[in-house]
Each structure stands twice: as C-alpha cells, then as structure tokens.
Amino acid sequence: MDKLEIKGKWNELKGKLKAAYGELTDDDLKYEEGKDEELLGKIQQKTGKGRDELVKWIKSL
C-alpha cells in the first residue's frame, strides 16, 4: 500500500478521528513529519482496526 499522505489536512482529519473514536487523545494523534507508520500504529492500538482499513477510511475523508 502506498504511503499515507496526511500532512496537508491533518487538523481536519484529527477532528474526524476523535469524533469517530472517542478513545483517541491528542497525544495519540500528534503528527510528526516522516512518522506516518508510528501514528497509524497508535491509532490501530486504540481502535482495534487494521492498518489497511484505517488508511482506506482516512483517505476517504
């Protein structure tokens, strides 16, 4: 799967993720350049969703 490109609209995506998954915190969703996989891992742990499912959902937003 291609690299998740979220940099440009991260604040919008972060709000939608927090609305959909209330257990996510600001620390869980702290975006750092080049650490997409680490961010996805944190989201996966909190939501129980698979990587591909999360990437597909995020890209659809």
Image: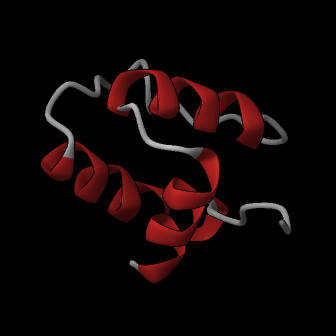
Name the residue located 44 percent from the left edge and 68 percent from the top edge.
57
Residue 43 placement (x, y as % from top left): 47, 33
Count of numbered badges drawn on the protein: 0
Instruction: Please give left or right for residue 15 compared with residue 55 in the image.
Output: left
Above or below residue 56? Residue 28 is: above
Residue 32 placement (x, y as % from top left): 69, 34
Decide which of 36, 8 is in the foreground and name it.
36
Instruction: Please give left or right for residue 36 compared with residue 29 in the image.
Output: right
Decide which of 49, 11 is in the foreground and name it.
49
Give the colour scheme shown.
Answer: secondary structure
Instruction: Please give left or right for residue 39 compared with residue 60 in the image.
Output: right
Above or below residue 5? Residue 47 is: above
Decide which of 49, 9 is in the foreground and name it.
49
Instruction: Please give left or right for residue 8 compared with residue 5 in the image.
Output: left
Image-quadrant location for residue 48 = top left
Quadrant in which the N terminus is drawn = bottom right
Name the residue located 73 percent from the left edge and 42 percent from the top edge.
36
Quadrant in which the C terminus is drawn = bottom left
Name the residue located 60 percent from the left edge and 69 percent from the top edge.
8
Q: Point out the residue furthest to the bottom here.
A: 60
Decide which of 21, 34 is in the foreground and name it.
21
Image-quadrant location for residue 60 = bottom left
